[in-house]
Amino acid sequence: MNESQRLQDDIQTKSMAKLAPLLNSYKLNCDSLATALKWKSIVLLLGNYSSGKSTLINELLGSNIQLTGQSPTDDSFTIITSPDPGSEPKDIIGSSLVNDERMPFTAFKEYGEQFMSHFALKQIDSPQLADMAIIDTPGMLDSITEKDRGFNYNRVIGDLAKLADLVVLMFDPHKAGTIREVYDTIRNTLPANTGEDRIIFVMSRIDECDNPADLIRSYGTLCWNLSQMTGRKDIPRIFMTYAPDLSRVPESMAAWNNERAELKDKILAAPSLRVNHILQHIDKQAHELRMISEVLTAFSNKGRLLLRKTSRAAASTALFLFFFLDIIVREFTGLPETTLISSLLSGTVGWPNLLIPTIGVGSATFLISLFFSRVQFPRLKKQSVTEPEKLIDLDSDYRQQLWTQVNAQVRLLLKAAGLKDVIVGHQINLRKIDKFISGDLQNYYKKIS
Ligand SMILES: Nc1nc2c(ncn2[C@@H]2O[C@H](COP(=O)(O)OP(=O)(O)OP(=O)(O)O)[C@@H](O)[C@H]2O)c(=O)[nH]1
Ligand SMILES: [Mg+2]
């Protein structure tokens, strides 16, 4: 095990141990974190059909592991990786993959039989794949509808993109971004599921352009389509490549010779991004937890303040009733013969003198605690559930973004809040999260810098 894998293991075990109890206490699912921390680095290859995805994989691995062809060739999601050390390479079918707890695909069970029959893992002895897996995906099409595929293609892509350290999006000059599924993926699916820095754009098969003018036209079309899809005017870097073994590279394309090598280096370097991405995921999760805990702490602080005020009022009422209730009762009923104050003055206090004062104190305490629990606390809860954002400052874009992630859960937790949340509070959780963020997490960042 090398240094980076050791660090990754350490991060995985410790972070899970520290964050899981907190996630549980805020009724959040640990699965997403556990899944993100599992297994090896993943590179996801997406693109329209015949854009050269499988060709690039074969070239990277020096083996014809994937079928290639001019028409839509492959309608499956294929994970390609090396076998476990000491094991023989084998193929694993989709239904086994989604049941293997060591791998991050258990949640894919929900996509059903149709998906599972289009999902498989192929193992190949390849040093590049020791700590990495490449996922070849079905080419994106124009005509097919979600129903035709039999599973929700874009949701599957979204879930895979969440796991991937690198997403390679491939186009070819003939269909430079005009495919409907490509549009949906770039417009709706990827932005919500992966960081912009994790996507690389590739125009492949550029050797099929007859001349530079043809190439520039295709590049321009792709840029135009990309900006329509992303809604942005700036154009990301697009790797312009071709498969050297297949191409009849015209002289004029020689300028692009290095792009393929650079692209392959980038893909093979994906494992070096893994620790960083794991930390980003943990960081995000910890800050979301922190915000939830912050809101609940603010809620419990408000509750405590209210309880303190009410208790103070209760204490003065109880004190008043302790000394004067028997005098008031005597005014109306003529009894008791001796009040507490007169017995105190005469130095003859006995149990009978304490009876009415005790009833007074007991009733005041009971009524006021009833008032707090039945009137004041529900009112505070209602206010907080309606406008939970008022409990904290959302004074930066980052905090507002976090808020959009957590506010639904915060509302649920506030709706379910009880007196325990006021009495015990959430300060301890908040302290634990702060300690994790400023201690463990910072140490990990230092180690990878
Ligand atoms: N001339 C040329 N042909 C290429 C290049 N890359 C791929 N091809 C050919 O283009 C066709 C499609 O390539 P594939 O690798 O099968 O494409 P794909 O993206 O995997 O396609 P699907 O699996 O159908 O989505 C094949 O016939 C390849 O031989 C290239 O750079 N230059
Ligand atoms: Mg293919």
Image (cartoon, rainbow, N blue to C red):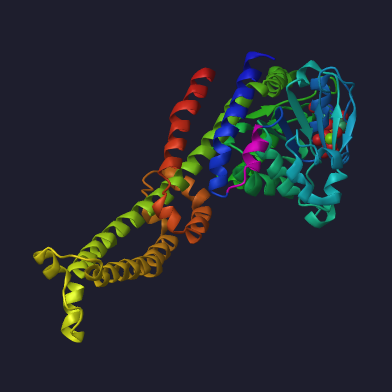
For residue 123, above or below residue 316: above
Identify which residue is drawn at 78% across, 54% down.
146
Identify which residue is drawn at 88% across, 26% down.
65
- The image position of residue 363, as x and y in percent, is 31, 71
The reply to whether the magenta stretch includes residue 256 is no
Kindly report the secondary structure that dominates the magenta region of the rendered protein: helix
Q: Which residues are magenta?
A: 28-37
- Asked if one can make out residue 201 in the rendered structure from this viewpoint, the answer is no
Q: Nearer the viewer, residue 235 or 278?
A: 278
Q: Nearer the viewer, residue 441 or 24?
A: 24
Identify which residue is drawn at 11% across, 70% down.
342
For residue 72, above or below residue 146: above
Image quarter where ligand 1 lies: top right
Q: Nearer the viewer, residue 191 or 40?
A: 40
Residue, far top: 2
- The image position of residue 233, as x and y in percent, is 54, 41
Which of the 4 quarters of the picture holds residue 248? top right
Q: Nearer the viewer, residue 197 or 160?
A: 160
Q: Is residue 390 left or right of residue 446?
A: left
Residue, far left: 345
- The image position of residue 201, as x and y in percent, is 66, 33
